[in-house]
Amino acid sequence: MVSTAGKFGPYSLAGPYSQTGPYSQSGADLVRSRIALQVRLALLRPGDRLPDTGALAEQLGIGEMTVRRALEGMCQDGLLDRRRGRTGGTFVSAAFDAVVPAHHDPAAAASAEAFLLLLECGLVAHASGEVGEADLGSLRKLVAEAEEAGQEEQAGQEGERERETRFHLELAETLGGPGLRAVTADLLGRLALLAPPPGPEAIRRRSRCHAELLDHLVEGRTDRAVRAVKDHAIHR
């Protein structure tokens, strides 16, 4: 991991987001984004039961009442289902994928994408030339898996999107540590609800940008590494 101390100047990254920083979200938004990210990563699937509110509150570091209200809101939005009885609880809606497009918000998505781009450009510029191949093992593996899947005639779109998301999470942790992984997770979770997922061809182009980025990072070609991040953002 490359130290990012002082890199972002006045930008505060204390907690999931600083309320005085450039980007913040409520506790309810945090619950929504993390659940959406879990679905994108296939850690939760339509029909799966969520952990109880106490467990979710502990995981996210927020109050149970906030979690409960967030879950109620997601039930009203059709993203989750509430079932009563001995086998009841809160479940990912069976219609989750069909409901998500109703929550797309181009303006809010553009804002989140811009912040993610800024964050990754800063991390990459700071880390360029300071990381070696030994630091990039998990990232190289994701790129190799994406390339292998791209050669198959019927590569699953869900698997491609999952690898794309995991790459960004791993990149943030490799270059900035767990705190920046958490920030990235929240942004990617928001985008999973706010923006349509990239199509197969866009993901394949992004994967090529991933490979180029890793090469430039190791070789210390800062300008090219940052350009690879920007080129990645172009492909939607």
Image (cartoon, grey):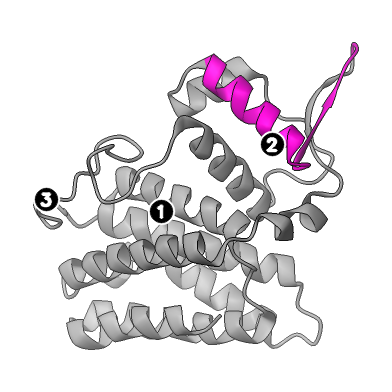
Residue 12 x, y percent position in the rendering? 19, 44
Could you tell me which secondary element the residue under label 2 belongs to? Answer: helix
The residue indicated by pointer 1 is 184
Which of the pair 179/130 is nearer the observer?
179
Specify the segment rendered in magenta.
64-86
In the image, is residue 217 above or below residue 205? above
Find residue 21 and report its image quarter.
top left
Give the CA separation, mark 1 to mark 2. Answer: 22 Å
Which numbered disc flags the more N-terminal residue, 2 or 3? Answer: 3
Is 173 situated left or right of 33 in this image? left
Tell me the distance, in whole angstroms, between the alpha carbons under discs 1 and 3: 18 Å
Query: Is 82 located above or below residue 138 in the figure?
Result: above
Judge from the rendering whether residue 120 lies leftward or rightward of residue 53; answer left or right: left
Q: Which residue is mark 3?
A: 10
Distance Cα–Cα, label 2 vs label 3 = 34 Å
Closer to the N terminus: mark 1 or mark 3?
A: 3
- Mark 1 or 2: in front is 2
Q: Residue at x 30, y 34 (%)?
A: 15
- Counting labels gives 3
